[in-house]
Image (cartoon, rainbow, N blue to C red):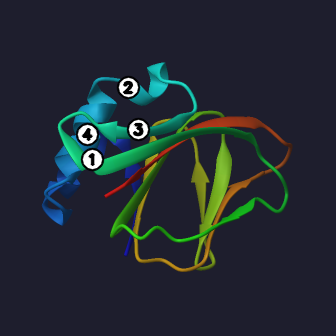
Amino acid sequence: MIIFDTLDNMELYLKISDKFIHVITVMDRSLPYDQGVGKYKCPECEEVAYEISAYPTTDKGRVEIPSEKEFSLEIVLEGEAVTSINGSVFVMSPGRFLLSSNEKDIKRGITRNIDKSVKSVIFRF
């Protein structure tokens, strides 16, 4: 399953998982914008973990090992990057999210034209 949408529409997907509300709560509080690079847990639900990263994009991107958790939700906080999941390409920019479940071939941080700095958060739940 792959969902690519805007942050304004996140509440439309609450039925996907009972933990999704905690992702929305963290984003509503702007925690990932204020926190530095590192791994965190949602204050209300420790089963929802998130990692904030800062990295330069490259023409090859970086291959990611699929999460052991059921869902992975990526949000670019600053900059722009391309994410490829099973051959499908998504342009990630602020205001968008990419939710995936049980995907095997994930590549993040691909440059679209010139290398850029990116800050992103990935929730796993």
Q: Disc 1 marks which residue?
A: 10
Q: Quadrant of the C terminus?
A: bottom left
Q: Residue at x 67, y 37 (%)?
A: 118
Q: Nearer the viewer, mark 4 or mark 2?
A: 2
What's under tag 2, amino acid-wise?
Leu
Q: Disc 3 marks which residue?
A: 40
| Image side of residue 31 versus residue 117, left or right | left
Q: Reading the chain from its start, which is encountered first: label 4 or label 2?
A: 4
Q: Residue at x 78, y 51 (%)?
A: 111
Q: Disc 2 marks which residue?
A: 31
Q: Reading the chain from its start, which is encountered first: label 2 or label 1?
A: 1
Q: Are marks 4 and 3 in contact (CB under 8 Å)?
A: no
In the image, residue 109 above or below residue 60: above
What's under tag 1, amino acid-wise?
Met
Q: Position of residue 107 (x, y in %)?
A: 66, 66
Q: Reading the chain from its start, which is encountered first: label 1 or label 3?
A: 1
Q: Quadrant of residue 101 in the image?
A: bottom left
Q: Disc 4 marks which residue?
A: 24
Count of labels shown? Answer: 4
Q: Residues within 10 Å of mark 4 (few under 14, many from 20)?
A: some
What's under tag 4, amino acid-wise?
Ile
Q: Are marks 1 and 4 in contact (CB under 8 Å)?
A: yes
Q: Position of residue 59 (x, y in %)?
A: 85, 58
Give me the C-alpha separation between circle 4 and circle 2. Answer: 11 Å
In the image, residue 64 above or below residue 44: below
Give me the C-alpha separation between circle 2 and circle 1. Answer: 16 Å
Q: Are marks 4 and 2 in contact (CB under 8 Å)?
A: no
